[in-house]
Amino acid sequence: MIIIKPFIFNPFQENTYLLHDETGECIIIDSGCFSRNEEEELLAFINSNSLKPVKILNTHGHIDHIFGNSFLQHKFNIKIFGHKADDFLIENAVQYGSSFGIDIKIPPKVNVGIEENSIVKFGNSELKVIHVPGHTPGGIAFYNEEQKFVIVGDVLFNLSIGRTDLPGGDYQTLITSINSKLMTLPSDTIVYSGHGPSTTIGEEMESNPFL
C-alpha cells in the first residue's frame, strides 16, 4: 500500500509529495525543498522511517517544483523522471528564478523521459503517467487506480486550474487536458495538487467554475 507524505516547501508554498510502501522504497514527486531547513526536514523523514529513495519525479519543470532535485540527486544518486517537453523550462530555470528575485543554481536535467501511459515503479507499487499539457507543454500527472489518487502538479486545484500565462502555457489546451484526461477518472479519485489542499474529481466536476 502506498503512503503519501506531503510537505509544503519554498516561498511559493509548493506541495512536495513523498510516496513509500511496505518495502521501504520511496519516490519524491516535485521536490521543492529550497532552504537548508527544508532539505533537513525531508531528510529527517526519510531517515526516521528507514526509507530508500529510488526516483525523483517532476510533474512539470517550473522552478518551485524542482528546487530540491539537485540536493536529492547528489544525496542519493538517483535519477530524475519527467516529460522532455519541459526541458526548456529547466534549461532556463536560473533566468526564471531571477525574474522572481530568487537566485538558484543550474538544476540537473531530466535523466529519464516519460510520456503518456508510462509506468513508474517503486517497491511493490506503480503509478501510471497521464500527459496533461496546458500549464506547461510537458505537464504530467501520476495516477494510481487501485488506491484512487492522482498527483497532478499545477494542472488542477481545489476550485481552480493552473495558470497559462507562463512560457509554454495554453488555456484551451489545459481545459482540454483536464476534461479529457482527469475528469474521466472515477469521481472519488483524490486529487493531490501542486499548491493548496487536496480535492476529488467529483468535487471539481460539480463545483470548479473553470470546468
Image (spheres, grey):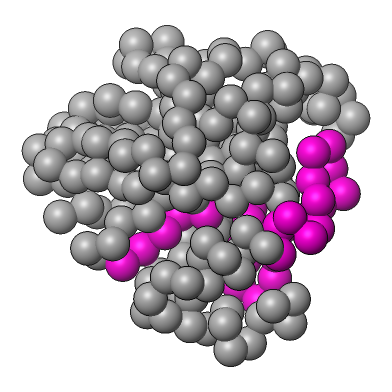
- In the displayed structure, does residue 46 sit left or right of residue 63? left
Q: Position of residue 7 (x, y in %)?
A: 46, 48
Residue that appears at 66% across and 30% down: 86
Q: Residue furthest bottom?
A: 206
The one of 87 and 98 positioned closer to us in this rendering: 87
Residue that appears at 34% across and 27% down: 55
174, above or below 40, in the image: below
- In the displayed structure, does residue 79 sit left or right of residue 196? left
Quarter of the image where one finds residue 138: top right
The one of 189 and 44 positioned closer to us in this rendering: 189
Q: Residue furthest left?
A: 23
Q: Position of residue 51 (x, y in %)?
A: 20, 33
Please give the count of numbered marks on the rendered protein: 0
Quarter of the image where one finds residue 53: top left
Q: Is residue 7 at all visible to an observer of this figure?
A: no
- In the displayed structure, does residue 152 sit left or right of residue 98? left
Magenta-tinted stretch? 148-175
Quadrant that contains the C terminus: bottom right
**Residue 151 lies in the magenta stretch:** yes
- In the displayed structure, does residue 184 sit left or right of residue 106? left
Residue that appears at 84% across and 37% down: 167
Quadrant that contains the N terminus: bottom left
Residue that appears at 39% across and 44% down: 117
Q: Position of residue 205 (x, y in %)?
A: 57, 82
The one of 54 and 9 positioned closer to us in this rendering: 54
The one of 5 and 175 positioned closer to us in this rendering: 175
**Residue 20 lies in the magenta stretch:** no
Q: Is residue 140 at all visible to an observer of this figure?
A: yes
Q: Position of residue 176 (x, y in %)?
A: 68, 63
